[in-house]
Structure formats: C-alpha cells, structure tokens
Amino acid sequence: MTNDIRSAVYDLGRAFEAFKEANDQRLREIERRGSADPLTEMKVNRLNAEITRALDSADAAKRRVDQIETALHRSPVGGGGDDWKEAEAFMLERKGFISGDLGIDAYRQYKNAFRGYLRKNNAGSGVDEIKALSVGSDPDGGYTVTPDMSGRIAALVRETSPMRQVANVITIGTDALEGIHDLNEATSGWVGETEARTETAAPKIGEYRIPVHEQYAEPRATQKLLDDSLFNIEEWLAQKIAERLARMENESFIHGNGVKKPRGFLTYAAGTPGASAFDVIEQLPSGASGAFAAEDPGDALINLVYALKSAYREKAVFMMKRSTLAEVRKLKDGNDNYLWQPDFQMQQGGTLLGFNVIEAEDMPAIGTDSLSIAFGDFNAGYQIVDRQGIRILRDSFTAKPYVKFYTTKRVGGDVVNFEAIKLMKFSAS
C-alpha cells in the first residue's frame, strides 16, 4: 500500500512537470500568433487528464489505507466486504485483539445474527439473538440499522459528499436545529470628563432554523433470493442505498431549494451580507462572459480570495467542478508562476493560491453567468444537520413474496454565516 502511494506521488510530479512545459508552449503560441496550435492544445488537454488520473490514483490509495484503518477500529456487521476481510485477517494475526467490548468470536456471532434478521426476520433465532438485534431501536418501534451498519453507510456518504468534508455537521434529537444570528453591535462614543452620558443603542440578535428533511428508499427482494443468493444481498442493498442518498445530499447542499430538502448555498441572491440584509452571498465577476478574462485571468481568483475577511481565510477552501479545475490549472500569475499546484500530501484537488481545492461535481460547469467557483470557510458558513442516522425496517408481510427494506434518513442543511462564503460569477461585470 505504501508503494502504491509512493508510485502515485511520483506519477503526479512527472505529469505536472510535463503539463507545465506543454502549457508554457501553448501560452507562447497564443502570445505570438493569437491562438495555439491544435496539436499543442490536444497535448495540454491530454496531460491535464493525466494529472487528474494521477490525483485519482493517489487519492484512491490513500482512501484504501483509511478504509482499512477505519475497519480496524470497528466491528462491522453484515457480511464483511473486501475492506473488512483484509482488516479482519490482520486482526486475527494480533492475538488478544478486542474491538470495543466485542472480540472476534463475538463479532462473528453478531454478524450472523444480524444477517439472519435481514434474511429471515429472526426465524429460528434464540432470545439472545433477538435481544442483541434490538439494541439501538428507536422508541417509536421498528429496528434501526445496527451501529456498525449505520457507520458503514455514513462512511460512504462522507467519502462521496465533499460538503461533509468541509461543512459543519451536527446530529440532533429533534426535528430542527435553531441558532442565533449576532448581526449588530453596541453603539458607543467619546465623552469629556464632566459631560452628560446619553443612552446608547443595545445590539439586537436574530434567529435561524434548519429543519431536517426525510430521504427514503424501499428496495425489494424475494425471500427466496435472500435465502439462496450466492452473494450478500443485504450488503449490496446497503451500498446502493448509501450511494443514492449521498448523491441526493450532495446535490441539495449545493443546489437544493429548501422545500422538503436542504437549501444549497448557490440558491441565495447576490449581495454583500450586512445587518440589514444578511441572507445574501457576494458574487464576484470573472472578467468575461462564460470564461476567465483574456488578460490577467488569475486576478479574478485573487479578488475572490481577498473579498473574504481574514478571519475566515485560515480555513477557507476552493470548491469547483473537475472540468473547471482543468481550466484553472492553466492559469499563471504576472511572474509566470502557475496558480495551481499539486498537493503531495494527498489532497486530491491540489492547492490554488495556497488554498486547498475541493472537487465537487455538483458545482456548475463554466458558462454564461454560471457560479462555477466557490471560496470560503464552509465550516463556519454551512451547517449540515443529521437526525440520528439511517434506519432500516424489514417488512416481509405487505408485499409477499417480496421482502421490503424500508430505509430512511433525515438530514437538513443551510447557510448560517453568509459572509463566510464567496462565489465567482462567470460574467464580464
């Protein structure tokens, strides 16, 4: 695994050097003739794609290590995919290993009991097994996903949703999260030693509320398939559900309209947040319609960075679609230095002007008036709210001969600090 990471880093460095050489040639041709040779453009695009593949390879190797480390610190139930099999083999070599309160034998017994619940609704199970499977059930009835199954699905959501990597995430026990907006300050003034003191205005506060919204899935499988399948059906269903929930969340955190779903940060009106109008997000122009400006294109990115107050810049990141990042990689400053640099610490998007880049495929592609680049401290600016987690209810009665796995998850999201996020609008002004 270490060799894979080392090899990926080497390939990334080699690809980036070749890309810089080809792109420098492209820029020289544009300067001399007004346009670049098509063959040069093709070469730059090919090398740009090679950088992306190298970044993906490095990120995949790092993710693989992280998954094994995560598996080593929990006792997954439900069939053990390749990650857990590899981790379990390692654990078995370590005599006396105990994960939490469960040893290897207890882990296997619990895994088999939970699989029996999904397949046969505890048919033929002993009382001890039923009690074990009831741990973690909600007061309103039904079986929740066991902690390790929920953890597995949540891990998949975190890996595929870039907003969860950078936003603030909190789990609540009610149907909404409420908080305070502190937008005003107390007034004061200068006064002489013996002058009268008049009353000054006290600051006012506001309130925000983020409700949670319900996602659901209800896949079905026949009891015969669950009984006789050669592979783990419940694990496959859990993976498919997790992928779908992740895509729904990711899109909503960016584009959602707030109706029965989270509200995305791209849906707010343009403006400069202040005490009188806080729920607006500042938009800065790129300098050209649907493109970067022809001259000094990197200036728009610099303007975007310094539109953000210094208090937020320490944890700020860029967020953009991969195709947008491919265009950003070609930009240089006035001293002929590339604005983008690969990050050899395995941050997939690299760094832009010294700030990490988060690749988010739900961000718009570059087009006329598109909001294709976001920059800010999303931990301060965007709040994700989870309600307990994912729950599965097994229903083998209402749709015979099918068994329904009714799966729900409640999540909300909204901007709470509008001055912590800035957007680039691809327009002339």
Image (cartoon, rainbow, N blue to C red):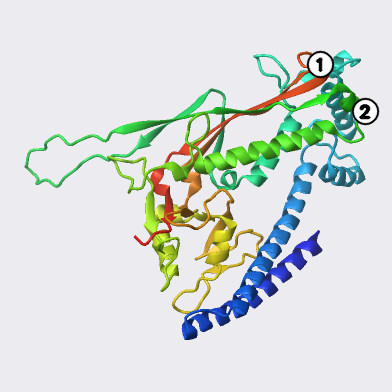
400 shown above or below 294: above
Left or right relative to 140: residue 295: left
Q: Earlier in the sequence, mark 2 or mark 1?
A: 2
Q: Residue at x 63, y 68 (%)?
A: 48
79 shown above or below 320: above
Q: Residue at x 77, y 41 (%)?
A: 73
Image quadrant holding the C terminus, namely bottom left
Q: Residue at x 51, y 44 (%)?
A: 254
Residue 285: percent from the left, percent from the top? Answer: 38, 59
Residue 338: percent from the left, percent from the top? Answer: 53, 73
Three-letter code, disc 2: Asp
Mark count: 2
Determine if residue 209 is in view. yes
| Residue denoted by label 2 | 228
| Residue denoted by label 1 | 400
377 shown above or below 56: above
Residue 307: percent from the left, percent from the top? Answer: 37, 57
Q: Nearer the viewer, mark 2 or mark 1?
A: 1
Instruction: Give residue 150's mark.
Output: none
